[in-house]
Image: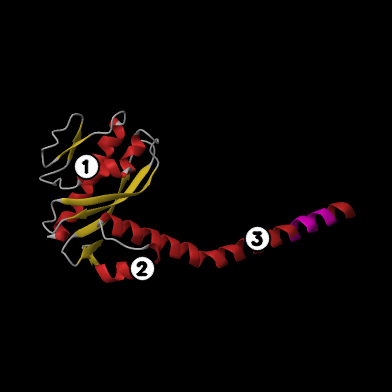
Amino acid sequence: MKDQIKMIVFVIIMGIIAAAILVGTDNFTSATISDNKEYALKTNILEAFEISYKVDEVLKVYDETIREETKGGYLIYYTKEGNAGFEFEGRGLWGPIRGFLTLQPDYVTIKGIQITYNEETPGLGGVVAERWYLDKYKGKKFDPEIIIKKDANMTSDVEVDAITGATATSSSFQLMLNKTYQEKKGVLE
């Protein structure tokens, strides 16, 4: 009986010590984690707007070139040149796809797209996050919407080639881009 009580007390003490270590570690690292998330977001925004920066000057360049404004409940980012951008999110085939979309001053023409997170299969749906694929969207227009399809007419202002072998990801990406644009279009004008 005495040994069992010693065992229970030992387990309780070890549990308290382990919990204290975890809470302490969380308190110690939470500010750094928050700073890293802010840095990553601002880096992605600068890249989507195609604004040059040095790694050690991201925050300075961001503060000098980007203005944040909440309109209609949405956070919209603007550059001095009149470009606008906003975050988007939707469901891909295997999980969420998150990114940042920038528009030229006409608020219809795509300036750039940056994917910040995706769970798509590398080499298939994961192509949605690769720069060479995202560059295909530059200059395309939401007029009235972006169309992603196999054998797209590359001279068209609204068509982009679908990802080979990733029809579901392409369809999902088309839906999330058009839906997000339609939601935010009114606050941009």
Judged from this view, the residue extending furthest toward the right is 2
Res 137 quadrant in image: top left
Q: Which residue is mark 2?
A: 59
Q: Is residue 72 above or below residue 172?
A: below
> Could you say whether the residue bearing mark 1 is in a helix, strand or loop?
helix
Picture coordinates of residue 143, whole percent (x, y): 10, 45
Marker disc for residue 136: 1
Q: Which residue is mark 3?
A: 19
Q: Residue at 16% x, 64% y: name it.
A: 81
Please give left or right for residue 92 compared with residue 50 in the image: right
Q: Position of residue 39 (x, y in %)?
A: 39, 62
Does residue 16 appear left or right of residue 70 in this picture? right
Q: Which residues are magenta?
A: 6-13
Q: Horizontally, is 54 left or right of 67 in the view?
A: right
Q: CA distance from mark 1 to mark 2?
A: 28 Å
Q: Counting other residues with Cα less than 10 Å from the Cα at mark 3, is it few (<14), some (14-19), or many (20 or more)?
A: few
**Front one among 15 and 140:** 140
Q: What distance separates the C-alpha of mark 3 from that of mark 2? A: 35 Å
Is 10 a magenta residue? yes
Kind of residue sitting beneath label 1: Lys
- What x and y, as percent, mark residue 48? 27, 55
Going from N to C along the chain, the mark reached first, 1 or 3, is: 3
Measured as percent of width and height from the top left, residue 78 is found at 21, 64
Question: As shown in the figure, which amino acid type bears the numbered disc 3?
Answer: Ala
